[in-house]
Image: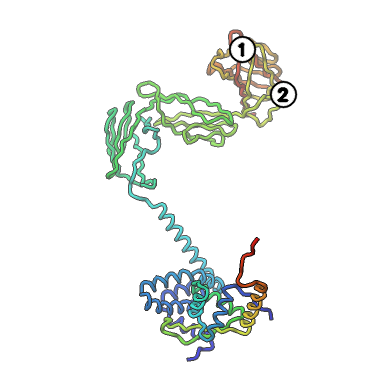
């Protein structure tokens, strides 16, 4: 099965879902992303990404019971699928590969 | 309580629970996926509750609205992707309506009128006043502008005579120039006041506007019209309106001068006050010589430079045409004489410049309009005729400079 290619926001969202485990729902994911990336993604942008990941088969979701704090709406919890886990491993492998040979800390080369 | 395995029942429940919410209904009407809307609004509600406790209601509401606005492109995109064809059509209609409304509001805002700020003279204004050539009563064309220069529809400007020649001026701005002279009229609108100079130059009669000959490429120039005032003297300041019948031949520029555009003929109505005169304008095409003229070159003019004793011989086109020689220099004595009766060349009148013809051509001298102008009406029955222009007369300058114009008539 081919590994899905991931954009930057898709990758960070998948990682947040993997990190949050059974607490991975929209608001929690958004707060996690804000804390780790320093960027305040809009709710619409996040759910568009989550829906795209679900369409790619990398995530699955289920709903909780309606909650008063959400105006009677339910929370939608996301879970990494097997394909999602493979995509993350592939992304990690790819990142490791492209970072290979780069010493730390990075120094500019003197001409 | 464990999460439920399927989302559809909860979506329905959530949608039903929140059916009263205006936001839900508005977003559902857009055609977005109900589950997407429920997730988005649920997160917003949950965080709104947190922020209301932490930052206060006002800050939380502000955040809620800004977050909804930030998410609106994603809602629209979701509606485009997920919506049914009818929902997409509805969305397109919404977007169009919002776009049109915003455009209308923007235009209305930009073109809104402010309070009256200036009184300015309208049509017919000269650099230092308004020229009135009418004999009868005429309304003063004042305009009321706001600070941005927009024209306001104000009818309650009041006018009064201040000084100058005594003529009737009504409070509504009707002025009757019963005599020649300048008048100061004051226009007032609320706190706005301005004095205008009215140059009363009533025109009783317009002389024949006559012909105006132009050449393509020449700068624009004023048509000359003779206007006579009530006192029988020439009117010196004129505010004329031109109506050109064929503006592809010549057209008036912003200052009322006529600019030739292409060879041809047009009539022009010159309206001065209550009077109208008609001028006829011919626009000629400049050529170097009459040799090799095409049949469609009906109006041409060629430069002529003749030293004493010299002559020019050009082929005459077949057909009917007018010929006009005009000298550029006022030092040239009036030309006298045109020759060309029947075939052959036989000058009959001695003059500094003679026009003659040779070949199967008949020409008749046309009445002389101005000194230095020589005109003839010619009929050439076949190609091969020749036009001859000679400068032989004594007493004039050593050289004569002018132009020879050819105006071919329609063949019937």
Percent from the top left, x then y, of residue A51? 56, 77
Provide the residue designation for mark 2: B383
Whole-percent x and y of residue B77?
A: 54, 70
Query: In the image shown, does B212 or B137 lie closer to the viewer?
Result: B212
Please tell me whether mark 1 or mark 2 is closer to you in this view: 1
Q: Residues within 10 Å of mark 1 (few under 14, many from 20)?
A: few
**Marks 1/2: CA distance?**
34 Å
Residue depicted at x 43% and y 57%: B106
Q: Does residue B384 appear anywhere in the picture? A: yes
Local crowd size for mark 2, using a 10 Å CA cut-off: few (<14), some (14–19), many (≥20): some
> Which chain letter goes with mark 1?
B
Kindly indicate whether the residue at mark 2 contacts the one at mark 1 (C-beta within 8 angstroms): no
Residue ranking furthest to the right:
B384
Q: Is residue A50 left or right of residue B229?
A: right
Question: Residue at 46% across / 31% down in the picture?
Answer: B270
Mark 1 element type:
loop
Q: Position of residue B78 (x, y in %)?
A: 54, 73
Q: Relative to the observer, which residue lies in front, B196 or A15? A: A15
Confirm whether circles 1 and 2 share one chain: yes
Question: Where does the image place residue A15, in percent across and percent down from the top left?
Answer: 57, 79
Q: Which residue is mark 1?
A: B398
Q: Secondary structure at mark 2?
A: loop
For residue B103, above or below residue A39: above
Q: Residue A86 lies in what quarter of the image?
A: bottom right
Residue drawn at 38 percent across, 21 percent down: B233
Instruction: Please report the residue visible at 60 percent of the width from the left and 13 percent of the height from the top.
Output: B337
Q: Which mark is residue B14?
A: none
Which quarter shows the C terminus of chain B? top right
Upstream in the sequence, badge 1 or badge 2? 2
Query: What chain does mark 2 sit on?
Result: B
Report the side of B10 relative to B59 (left or right): right
């Amino acid at each position: 099965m081919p590994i899905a290619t991931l954009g930057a926001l898709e990758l960070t969202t998948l990682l947040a879902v993997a990190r949050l485990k059974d607490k991975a729902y929209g608001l929690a994911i958004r707060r996690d992303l804000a804390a780790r990336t320093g960027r305040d993604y809009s709710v619409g942008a996040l759910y568009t990404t989550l829906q795209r990941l679900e369409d790619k088969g990398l995530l699955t979701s289920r709903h909780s019971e309606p909650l008063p704090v959400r105006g009677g709406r339910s929370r939608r919890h996301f879970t990494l699928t097997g394909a999602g886990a493979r995509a993350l491993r592939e992304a990690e492998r790819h990142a490791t590969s492209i970072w290979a040979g780069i010493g730390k800390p990075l120094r500019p080369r003197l001409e | 309580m464990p999460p439920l395995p399927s989302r559809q029942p909860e979506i329905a429940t959530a949608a039903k629970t929140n059916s009263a919410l205006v936001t839900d209904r508005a977003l559902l009407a857009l055609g977005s996926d109900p589950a997407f809307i429920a997730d988005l609004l649920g997160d917003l509600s949950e965080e709104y509750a947190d922020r209301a406790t932490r930052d206060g209601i006002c800050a939380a509401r502000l955040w809620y609205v800004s977050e909804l606005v930030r998410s609106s492109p994603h809602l629209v995109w979701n509606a485009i992707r997920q919506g049914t064809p009818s929902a997409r059509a509805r969305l397109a209609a919404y977007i169009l309506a919002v776009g049109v409304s915003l455009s209308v509001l923007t235009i209305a805002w930009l073109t809104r009128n402010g309070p009256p700020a200036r009184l300015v003279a309208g049509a017919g204004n000269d650099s230092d006043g308004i020229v009135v050539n009418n004999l009868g009563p005429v309304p003063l064309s004042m305009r009321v502008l706001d600070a941005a220069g927009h024209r306001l529809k104000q009818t309650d400007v009041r006018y009064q005579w201040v000084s100058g020649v005594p003529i009737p001026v009504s409070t509504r701005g009707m002025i009757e120039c019963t005599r020649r002279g300048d008048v100061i009229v004051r226009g007032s609108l609320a706190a706005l006041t301005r004095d205008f100079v009215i140059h009363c130059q009533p025109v009783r009669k317009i002389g024949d506007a006559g012909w105006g000959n132009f050449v393509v490429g020449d700068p624009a120039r004023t048509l000359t019209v003779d206007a006579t005032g009530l006192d029988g003297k020439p009117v010196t300041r004129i505010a004329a309106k031109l109506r050109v019948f064929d503006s592809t031949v010549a057209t008036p520029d912003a200052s009322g001068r006529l600019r030739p555009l292409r060879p041809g003929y047009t009539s022009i109505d010159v309206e001065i006050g209550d009077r109208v005169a008609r001028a006829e304008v011919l626009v000629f095409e400049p050529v170097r010589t009459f040799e090799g003229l095409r049949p469609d070159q009906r109006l041409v003019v060629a430069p002529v430079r003749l030293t004493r004793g010299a002559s020019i011989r050009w082929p005459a086109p077949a057909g009917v045409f007018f010929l006009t020689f005009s000298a550029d220099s006022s030092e040239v004595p009036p030309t006298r004489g045109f020759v060309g009766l029947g075939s052959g060349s036989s000058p009959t009148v001695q003059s500094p410049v003679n026009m003659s013809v040779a070949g199967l051509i008949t020409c008749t001298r046309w009445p002389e309009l101005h000194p230095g102008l020589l005109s003839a009406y010619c009929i050439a029955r076949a190609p091969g005729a020749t036009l001859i222009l000679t400068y032989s007369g004594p007493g004039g300058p050593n050289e004569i400079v002018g132009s020879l114009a050819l105006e071919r008539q329609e063949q019937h």
